[in-house]
Amino acid sequence: MAVEAPAKHVFDFDDEDDDGPVVFKRNNTSSSKQNQLNLEAKKASSQRHDGQPGRQASDAQAPNGQSSSSQKKPIPPSKSPPVRSPILIPKSSNSSAMASPARSSVVNSKASTSLNDQSKQETKQHKFTAFKEEKRPIKTTEPNSDDDNDSQPLSARLKGISSQGNKGASTSTPTLSWQCVPKIKIEGSAEDPDDEAPLSSRFKMKSNTGTSSSKPYESHEKKPLASKIQQNGSIMKEKQQKSSLLLDKRPLDKGNSSDQSYAKMPKISDTPTTMKSKQVTVKAEKDEDDDDHIPISQQIKKSVSSDSKTLSMKQKAIKVVSSSSKMINKKSKKEMKNSKYSKSTKLSPSSGDGQKKWSTLVHSGVIFPPPYKPHGVKMLYDGRPVDLNPEQEEVATMFAIMKDTDYMSKPQFKKNFWEDWSKILGKNHIIKGLDKCDFTSIHEWHLEEKEKKKQMSSEEKKALKEEKLKQEEKYMWATVDGIKEKVGNFRVEPPGLFRGRGEHPKMGKLKRRIRPCDITINIRKDAPIPECPIPGERWKDIKHDNTVTWLAFWNDPINPKEFKYVFLAASSSLKGQSDKEKYEKARLLKDYIKNIRAAYTKNFTEKDVTKRQIAVATYLIDKLALRAGNEKDDDEADTVGCCTLKVGNVECIPPNKLKFDFLGKDSIQYVNTVEVELPVYKAIGQFQTEKSKTDDLFDELDTSKLNAHLKELMPGLTAKVFRTYNASITLDDMLNKETKDGDVAEKVVTYQRANKEVAIICNHQRSISKSHSAQMSRLTDKITELKGVLKELKADLDRAKKGKPPLKDADGKQKRNLTPEAIEKKIKQTNAKIEKMDRDMQTKEDLKTVALGTSKINYLDPRITVAWCKRHEVPIEKIFNKSLLAKFAWAMDVDPDFRF
DNA sequence: ATGAAGACTTGTCTAAAGGCTC
DNA sequence: GAGCCTTTAGACAAGTCTTCAT
């Protein structure tokens, strides 16, 4: 594959300098209705749609199943090979002032986040021990502080802190006024020369592409937030353009972009861009009709008043908007063409947006687990050995090997298991219930097998490994647009018992074996169809859909209307590309955040309930990094997110605190008490009025409404972007504020602290390792021992200085005679060791319930980390392991000055 | 407008790999 | 180099969010 070097382009952005700080004070008026919550039993309502027939029967046609079927979605004809736009260098707006780290920890803690000054004091006590040092000045209403604040995560601004887990976290302050610095920026047209380079190649070229975006020069460009928001249209436009520039998305092909890229989106006749801008425009107009009659930006201005600049800006903005909305002017067109536009607009959906994801895709399909090998070990029923056929035995074994898990204490698990197993046993089987079943013998057999495996010699293990590798080798790779890429999960899931998390209603159900006839393969049209690894069987269907990235899928045996996909690995350029786009979108939010916050703050007291709910929900998502909270079926675990919070999940604690307590994703508990602004507090009280505990708090809201609203504020904005934004900006800010001179180890600790702060904000928890206490006591012992050594060394030093020989060691042996200098050196080394162990111990204790990995993998823009490592001479390997290095290959050449 | 379908990201747990100690 | 401990990679569950269909 030809790898073309991306041409570099320089974009000119006009910066309008309306930076005048605008101070926006929130008014606290609000109807207050404080209600006490009624307690009630729970049970949220939910609609159930059960047993839907699996989705489309395959339209497979060829008798052998090897023929390709027509797709439901129109597949764009893949004409020319995909041309990927080079990664453009976006100008990132770097807010000069860096945000301070988000402080409020969201995690399960009882800490509180305060918004008010007064709260500051209170919160002091809760400060996070680990971060005690850090003093962040809270600028409550400082007009000039804006800048800072805006780029900060809300939580940070709030400073509220919650304590995490057991530790108290501290928090801080409230920023009541957010300033707005409106600016209008007009982007110059950019050409995207790189369009021609294949994505993958682009990645490989480590050119500055990715990096470029990070170029320092971007910094000057300040973003005009206020203006942006307001002018929705215009702003959006700009943004879009910008984003498009930033995101190197697959470019519409120069000439024929429209056809292929948008095949799936029939609606858009024009170009997405156009559409987008139109929408936006409309929105803006609509806004004017709103109660406020004023676009957000305008509102802001009003409140702010102070700046005349703002005004002018606004006007400008408006101008821009109108023009943009009305028609795509040349510029925009050009930009669109150039690539990103479409992307930014539809950026979000990497899927389904009808964009071509690949031109050629070749792979070997998937590999299946080996067939079941009966072991013949008999279980007991009512004290007597029972005969089971292989199928029955297989399922019994699945249950037996879970003997030591918590599932065994869950009635639902056993009930579901029995329902499925009894079907396999048949009506006339001697086994009539689980109560009299004794699976011990099978469990023991399992343990023995495990032990045998463990006891194998290293040669045997190695041989086994090689054998496995040999079998799997061909499935491990796919060729995408001519480039070899790793496949993520090419192994079909083996049968087993479903291990749903939390109180999942389907836990324990049998996850049946998946066969080739369950699997749909997606591959380039003319490529050889992967050979079915099981003789005599064939694939369910073969598709050639280049608008999606999956290589294969099958229906989830537990929930047949859902699918299990085989995708490329995280290190693939396809994944890297979308990862980068995700972070670029989050960076874009930085430009809008000020106005978005101003807008929702204003709407806390909006008369229209839906709008008020949207405002409060957005606030919670921003401040607490809550997830959106999609609706769930009854046959799923009962967990919630923001939009699905129940009245009983939030407790109002006068005068203005809210205590959240709910089960979030994966049934991880979220407990957090935060101080909020009074209007929010009052609004929550109103939403709870006359509802039972199990009623929806935001009864007028769901994620689609919320996200639709967010998209009016910023192209492509959805609830989850706030998590990425707040996580990354927190890391960037903390790293920059707290990195001190020191050795690498100390810097790594600084990084971990920042990482931890993010994990807390995102509520990423882990269970305490079983060996945690043992590890701690071992460390304690070692430290004690070292301290003893130190004491001895000091004594020896004294003696050495007096010309006496050292004391005998514990065994009574005479130690070597050392010079005082040598002893001093040893003392120094020992001290360093003790310090390191102390630090390790503290870190370990600190992180015992916090999972750092999740945020590192999913929320922290790797360019922040890479740039920081470069600036501070920390080897990147100290922060990223091998797989993260591969996953973030696209970020490695970032400029050291990169700021999120 | 709403819900289903579909595709992809996020998240936790654990088996396996790798590293350290004796 | 055996055994233990830590880290990592992989498995797979559970979210989010867009588009399609009604």
Image (cartoon, coloured by chain):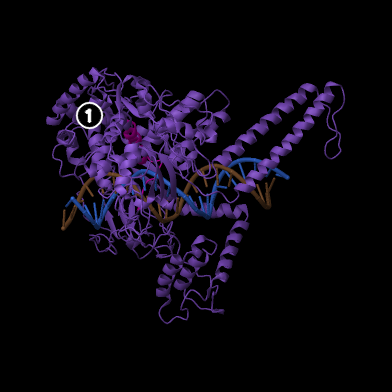
Chain colours: A purple, B blue, C brown
Image quarter of residue A96: top left
A59 relative to A311, above or below: below
Q: Nearer the viewer, residue A873 or A641?
A: A641
Residue drawn at (25%, 32%) of the image: A340
Q: Nearer the viewer, residue A837 or A884?
A: A837
Q: Tell me if residue A571 is in the magenta stretch.
A: yes
Image quarter of residue A802: top right
Q: Tell me if residue A153 is in the magenta stretch.
A: no
The quarter in which the C terminus of chain A is drawn is top left
Image quarter of residue A578: top left
Residue drawn at (21%, 27%) of the image: A298
Q: Position of residue A325 (x, y in %)?
A: 14, 31
A235 relative to A694, above or below: above
Helix, strand or loop: magenta stretch: helix
Instruction: Say which chain tag 1 marks.
Output: A
Give the left or right position of residue A421, taking residue A619 as reference. Answer: right
Query: What's the magenta region?
Result: A565-587
Q: Residues within 10 Å of mark 1 (few under 14, many from 20)?
A: many
Q: Which residue is mark 1?
A: A299
A692 relative to A390, above or below: above
